[in-house]
Amino acid sequence: MKNLKLKAARAGMDMSQQELAAKVGVSRQTISAIEKGDYNPTINLCIAICKELGKTLDELFWE
Amino acid sequence: MSMEYSVGYILGACVGVLITALFILVFLKFTKKDGNIKCRFDERQNIIRGKGYKYAFFTLLIYNALILVIGNVLEMYMDREMIMFIGICLSVIVYAAYAIWNEGYFSLNENPKRVMIIFGVVGVINLISGISSIVSGEIIENGKVSFRAMNLLCAVLMFSVLIVLAIKTICNREEDER
């Protein structure tokens, strides 16, 4: 299932996939895979993404 | 084997190992964006690489099982070294193709263009060496494909990796345009 909330939050901060990936220490393809719903990130990566986008885990990863 | 030849042989082997180690060191340094030797992969890439290794392992396992059955027949046409080397090349191609296709091949601090350049150069060097073996007739000895065909196989391996990389790059471009 696509993670549109993550995509929207990233776009809301005017951040590219590459920029977010660099900030959380993963590849651009990993961010792309999370947004497409092809990869389930670990809790550590979820927290890193949330911190970077200023959101909570619920806001980005809870359905 | 005389003593002199033996010492020369050992010295030659040592120099070969040193040159190979030096080449690997230069390769590791040259291909990194940050000059670090160590590759850094993220969690998704590590999973992909793990799966890639699994598929490569089973490829080699199945190949070895096949060789157990038809090895005697194959040995009539090629050296044992070649038979073993084909298995290694096959498993490496399976690993590389899987990892490239699932975006887990290049580390976070790696420059893919530089890796491709080195693979291309190594491929061309091996191709030239392989062709020269064909021209000099050394590739077939006593009616069998000799170990000298390893260079050709290496070239095939390098170009296969480059072809998968090129196809993946084209697919990614098309996906981005959509």
Image (cartoon, helix red, strand yellow):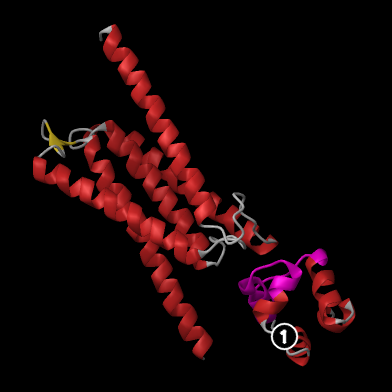
- The quadrant in which residue B93 appears is bottom left
Residue at figure coordinates x 68%, y 75% from the top left = A31
- The quadrant in which residue B97 appears is bottom left
**Badge 1 amino acid:** Met
The residue at which mark 1 appears reads as A15
Q: Is residue B126 magenta?
A: no
Q: Would residue B35 be seen by someone viewing this image from the given angle?
A: yes
Q: Position of residue B81 (x, y in %)?
A: 30, 33
Q: Image check: B38 left or right of B85? A: right
Q: Position of residue B100 (x, y in %)?
A: 49, 64
In this view, the residue in front, B34 or A34, is: B34
Q: Image check: B131 left or right of B101? A: left
Q: Position of residue B20 (x, y in %)?
A: 42, 38
Main SS, magenta residues: helix
Residue A20 in the image: above or below residue B15:
below
Q: Would residue B61 be seen by someone viewing this image from the given angle?
A: no
Residue B148 in the image: above or below residue B124:
above
Residue at figure coordinates x 47%, y 44% from the top left = B24
